[in-house]
Image (tube, rainbow, N blue to C red):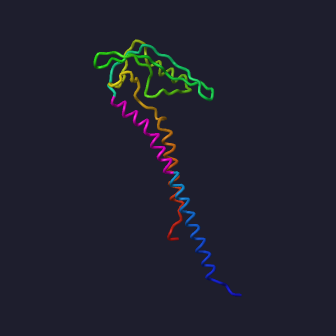
Amino acid sequence: MRVNHKEHLTNTAGKSNIEKRKGISQTLILSVLASIGILIALALYYWPVSQILQVNNYQSASCTILSKKLETVTTNGGADAYHPHFTFSVPTSDGKTYIVQGYGLISSSSSNKKAEQALLDNYKVDSRYPCWYDASNPTRAVLNRNLDAMAFAPGTIFLSGGLILLFIAFAGRSNPSA
């Protein structure tokens, strides 16, 4: 019985090349998916960061609360959510006064009615509170210029997913010296 060592070596080399190509294609696919996730994350981070930069340029003022109420919103799932709604007057540096509605940078809602009511209770009608307004458009004003950390959650999820995919792509590569 004769053993053909060359044939065996050729088959091993062919399998090795196929495995290398498979590893490269997996790495490429995972890298592309990771890049897409990271790009989506950057796009999702753009909005809250631009809002923060914009509101930091707002002028400060002392606004008077004209009215306040707790609004109830029904979500797509049928549950109730609540958010504070204020009407307040904004005196500008040029001596004009504007009437504005809202509270913060975004109109967010919460299912925690007590927490939202407590926020509303922090303000009294006919009392003055710090506020900030856009000098070029004073009808854009806020009583709260802080942005909820949840505004960054979607971007963080995509960024984390992209980084995990990159880690898997490059940690899973076979060692070329092996």
Which residue is outermost to the left? 94
Q: Is residue 55 left or right of residue 27?
A: left
Going 46% across and 32% down the picture, which residue do you hit? Answer: 148
Query: In the rendered view, would you say 116 is above or below 31?
Result: above
Q: Main secondary structure of the magenta part?
A: helix
> Residue 45 colored magenta?
yes
Residue at figure coordinates x 63%, y 26% from the top left: 78
Say if the magenta span includes residue 155.
no
Q: Quadrant of the N terminus?
A: bottom right
Q: Position of residue 137 (x, y in %)?
A: 35, 24
Vertical placement of residue 164 versus 20, above or below: above
Q: Quadrant of residue 122?
A: top left
Q: Outermost residue toward the top? A: 126
The residue depicted at 59 percent of the width and 24 percent of the height is 74
Q: Nearer the viewer, residue 27 or 136?
A: 136
Q: Position of residue 102 (x, y in %)?
A: 45, 21
Instruction: Single out the residue that lies furthest toward the front.
Output: 136
Q: Which residues are magenta?
A: 34-57
What residue is drawn where x is 55% and y is 63%?
A: 23
